[in-house]
Amino acid sequence: MDRDRPKRNRIKRIGLGEELSANHGQGVSEMVEIDRWGEVREEDAVLVIIDVQEGLVRAMEDSIGKMVVRNVQNLLGVAQELAMPVLSTEQYPKGLGPTVHEVRELLREPPIEKVAFDASTLEPFTARLTPLKRRQLILTGIEAHICVLQTCAGLLRRGYEVYVVADGASSRRKLDWEMGLRWMEKKGAIISTAEMIAFQLMKEAGTERFKRLVKGFK
């Protein structure tokens, strides 16, 4: 056996009651192989923004709320530059308000309204996601231990690779944020940061694209 070649782990979602579908949610009970040494690829990725709404952002510590909004904005800029699809949601907007202006003005499609915590159970969400035929989902939003976590679990069940952006997600309480990230990582999500994701997607410095996008991360 070639010891220098990275192995591809066979991942079973212990505690979720089912194995990953090799068909992205088509109900096929097979194990899929996920390259744990891989990276986000622009041709295979989708940015998912969960409930970055006025009422939820206001409930965060001010510096945390601003950080999340800034990092979601930066990733939206990268996604648009690379022509990557973006999906966004709003949890009960009548009570929690709309998506914050800084994010909303960059969206090309309206957010999907919901009351379910797991966005992956919603027909409007899957109707946008499934036809894209992309398997890597970059997950951001609020709150990390509720809607982000439950959406992450639903997407993992359906066989997607989920990259959770730690500094693009938050909860009202630090412990909930920490436990949410820990739980998602334990179930198979890859925990990353906005800058890590962005630089993986940009690939190299010195290009005009890099010069445009890197400004947001300084």
Image: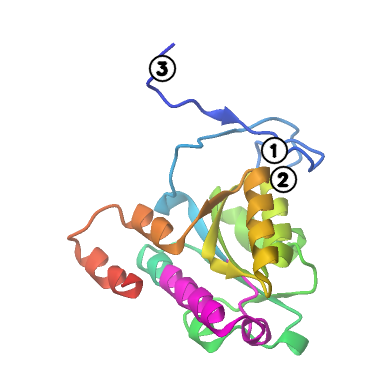
- Frontmost of labels 3 and 1 is 3
Rate crowding at label 3 as few (under 14), some (14 to 19) or many (20 or more) other CA atoms within 10 Å. few
Q: Main secondary structure of the magenta part?
A: helix
Q: Amino acid at mark 3?
A: Arg
Q: Measure the alpha-carbon separation of dots 3 and 1.
A: 27 Å
Image position, residue 209 (x, y; %): 25, 65
Left or right, 31 with respect to 18, comes to left
Query: Does residue 158 appear in this view?
Result: no
Rate crowding at label 1 as few (under 14), some (14 to 19) or many (20 or more) other CA atoms within 10 Å. many
Image position, residue 3 (x, y; %): 41, 17
Q: Residue at x 31, y 69 (%)?
A: 213
Residue 160 drawn above or below residue 30: below
Magenta-colored span: 49-76
Residue position marked by numbered label 3 in the rendering: 3
Tell me the quadrant of the picture where the N terminus can be found.
top left
Residue position marked by numbered label 1 in the rendering: 20
Number of on-image labels? 3
Image position, residue 182 (x, y; %): 65, 52
Residue 49 drawn above or below residue 101: above
Q: Measure the alpha-carbon separation of dots 2 and 3.
A: 31 Å
Q: Secondary structure at mark 3?
A: loop
Residue position marked by numbered label 2 in the rendering: 157
Residue placed most toward the observer, 125 or 98:
98
Image position, residue 108 (x, y; %): 50, 77
Q: Is residue 95 magenta?
A: no
Tell me, yes or no, whether the two marked residues, 1 and 2, touch with CB atoms within 8 Å: yes
Q: Residue at x 35, y 67 (%)?
A: 81
